[in-house]
Structures are given as structure tokens and as C-alpha cells.
Image (tube, rainbow, N blue to C red):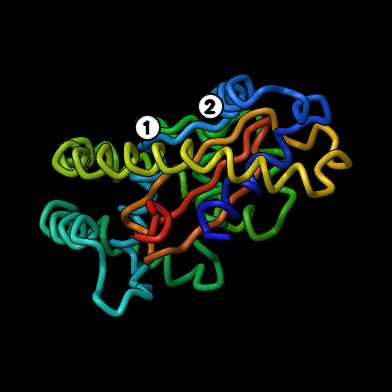
Amino acid sequence: MSRLVVLIFALMIPLSTVGQLSQGKGELEKSVERRVEVTENKTIFTLFCLLNLGGYDAENNPDGMHPVRVRVREQLVHTVRPELAKRIRDFYRQHSSAQPSDYSVVAMSTSGPPDFRFTAEWPEVSKEASFAALVDLPVLLRELYTSAPIEEIYAGVRPDYRKCIDEYRTAVLAQVAKVMAYCRTSALSSAGGGDAAHAVVIPNLLLSFSRAFGFVLDDTFDSIRRPSVEDRL
């Protein structure tokens, strides 16, 4: 089973019910299409601009970083104020144990650009020490977004993101039948309704190659991943 199939299976298990197993193929595909969204996200883009500027250099592709990541990093170096860049680097260094997934949960617990204000989710999220330690992250996100040309940088690479998303969405839908065939022979019926009513897959070209992680906030399962070639096959 490919990584893409595993991903869809992981997304669909918490979204499925016993009753869905009796649906026709067309109905089931429509149900999955309604509940699983593949989309861009400016909160995650801004966050990974900050992380790449701050010192996130991890890359497990022997051919190097994605061209979009290289381009964005170069633009950030030339457009972010030195004083702000230093504070971001200091913050990243001071929180060296924090993972990209930790940063992502905290960022997605805000209202997003331009204000990055914590939402009603934050009191519950902050009970986890690894997230609470990043309480000052929104301040830096807000300052980076409002003082650097983040929108302009994103506009320059958005065609690459849209192309990636379109290819990835097509692949997801194409694999639904295979996944559900697998589910019919699994213990899916014991999974119940699951923990999330909706799943959002966010391709991230500023993340290390083929890296992925996910988390649930409110009633949405967010999966942030850098798609690989195999994912689109």
C-alpha cells in the first residue's frame, strides 16, 4: 500500500461510520470529497517562512530542498529586517526541542494572518507543555507577516502550490476506491464516528521532503505534509 493510500486510510478512519460501508461507490466518493479537503494555508506558509528564516534547515532529499523552498528562503534573507531576523533566530534556538509539528499546532490555534490572535482553542492546547512553551510565537508571526512582504512572496510561488494541490487532490480522489476496498476487509466498523468531522490536507513545499504530521483541533484533522513523487502516482 502506497504512502498516499495509507494517508487517505488514516484520514478516512476517523471520518467513517458503519453505515457508510453500505453506500454505493458514487455516494461514498462524494462523502469523502465533502469531508477531506486538500488546500493551501497562509498560516502554515507564514509559519514555515519564520522557521526557515530561524534555522529550520532539515532536508532529507539527497537532491536538496524543493526549488520553492530555496527561492522563499533567499527572498526572506533579503527582505526581513535584520533585527527581526535575529529575534526569530534567537527564538528558534531557544526552543531547539520544539518540532515543526509543535509550531504548527500553536500557529493553527490562532486566527491566522494578519493578527495571529489565539482562538478559543488555545486554553486547552496550552495544557500541553510543548505547546505552552511557544506562547510567544504569534507575536513573531504577526510581526513577520506585517513587516515583510509575505503576501508578495507567496504570490510568487502560489502557482507551484496550486499545481501541487491540484495534482495531489486528483491522486487522493483516484485512490478512494482502493482505500475503501481495503476498509471493507478491515475492522473499520469498530471505529465508530471517530474524533474529527472534517480533514484538511495542507501540502507544504517549505517542509523537508516527504515529511508529514497531523493533529486534531476542534473538529478538524489537519495533515501537513510535503508530498513526494510517490504520493502523486
Q: Residues within 10 Å of mark 1 (few under 14, many from 20)?
A: some
Q: CA distance from mark 2 to mark 1?
A: 27 Å
- Who is closer to the viewer here, 126 or 90? 126
> In the rendering, at what x and y percent does residue 174 appear?
46, 39
Query: Relative to 40, does residue 73 appear above or below in the rendering?
Result: below
Occupied quadrant, residue 75: bottom left
> In the rendering, at what x and y percent does residue 215 appear?
63, 47
Query: In terms of secondary structure, where does tag 2 sit?
Result: helix
> In the rendering, at what x and y percent does residue 22 appear?
77, 25
Sequence-first disc among 2 and 1: 2
Q: Residue furthest left?
A: 78
Residue at label 2? 33
Total numbered badges shown on the rendered structure? 2
Q: Give the residue type that dot 2 points to.
A: Glu
- Asked if residue 152 lies left or right of residue 143, the reply is left
Residue lying at 69% horizontally and 48% vertically, measured from the top left: 182
- Asked if residue 113 lies left or right of residue 152, the reply is right
Mark identifier at residue 167: none
Residue lying at 42% horizontally and 55% vertically, measured from the top left: 231
- Asked if residue 207 lies left or right of residue 25, the reply is left
Q: Give the residue type that dot 1 points to.
A: Pro
Residue at label 1? 113
- Asked if residue 205 lies left or right of residue 222, the reply is left
Residue lying at 38% horizontally and 43% vertically, measured from the top left: 168
> In the rendering, at what x and y percent does residue 21 appear?
77, 30
Query: In terms of secondary structure, where does tag 1 sit?
Result: loop
Pick the quarter of the image with the N terminus: bottom right
